[in-house]
Image: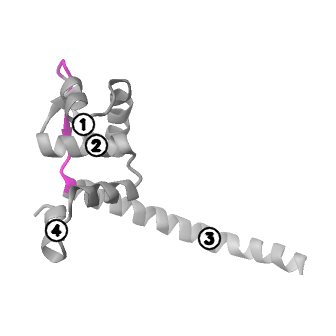
Amino acid sequence: MCLLLHWKTMSKSFSEDDIRSFLHSLKLGKYETEAYLTLLKNGPQDYKGLVKLSRVPYGKIYYTLDILIKKGWVKNSDQKPRVFYALDPEETLMNYLLDMKKQMADMERSVLRIIPQIKTLYGQSC
């Protein structure tokens, strides 16, 4: 079951603005969010279709899609014109969550290694 639909059944219904805010909290920019949501709602699109439906400026669409591809939210075809597809939102969000957990574990290890040195500095200032 789609993760976004699962949230709706567990709690309240989420508006599209709620989903936009949520995606922004995951560090997707305004244009990235609009392009991704447009692909989810309307299916695969080429550059022109995406510009028209998402209202992402033509001058920003290439960069925006490159970022979404690098982040693992979108893929594209090899054919000309290039067609872009939103990846499955449940899989994408779960991968994002796993990446965040890994980053937090790395951060915890770093903090635990640096605490003794920081404590030494703190002791010198007292």
Where are the magenta residues, as a range?
A: 79-89
- List the residue tagged with mark 2: 34
Toward the viewer: 54 or 97?
A: 54
Residue in the picture at 19% in, 34% down: 53
Can you say whether 17 is above or below 79 in the image?
Answer: below
- Given the image, on which type of amino acid does mark 4 rest? Ser
Question: What secondary structure is found at the residue carrying circle 3?
Answer: helix
Q: Which quadrant does the C terminus fall into? A: bottom right
Mark 3 and mark 2 lie on one chain; the one further toward the N terminus is 2
Can you say whether 19 is above or below 73 in the image?
Answer: below
**Residue 83 location in percent, x, y?**
18, 28
- Describe residue 115's horizontal placement relative to residue 27 as left or right: right
Judged from this view, the residue extending furthest toward the top is 80
Residue in the picture at 35% in, 33% down: 66
Can you say whether 50 is above or below 101 in the image?
Answer: above
- Marks 4 and 3, how far apart in space? 39 Å
Question: What secondary structure is found at the residue carrying circle 2?
Answer: helix
**Residue 58 location in percent, x, y?**
32, 24
Toward the viewer: 26 or 72?
A: 26
Q: Which mark is residue 111?
A: 3
Asked if the residues shown at circle 2 and circle 1 are in contact, with their CB atoms under 8 angstroms apart, the answer is yes
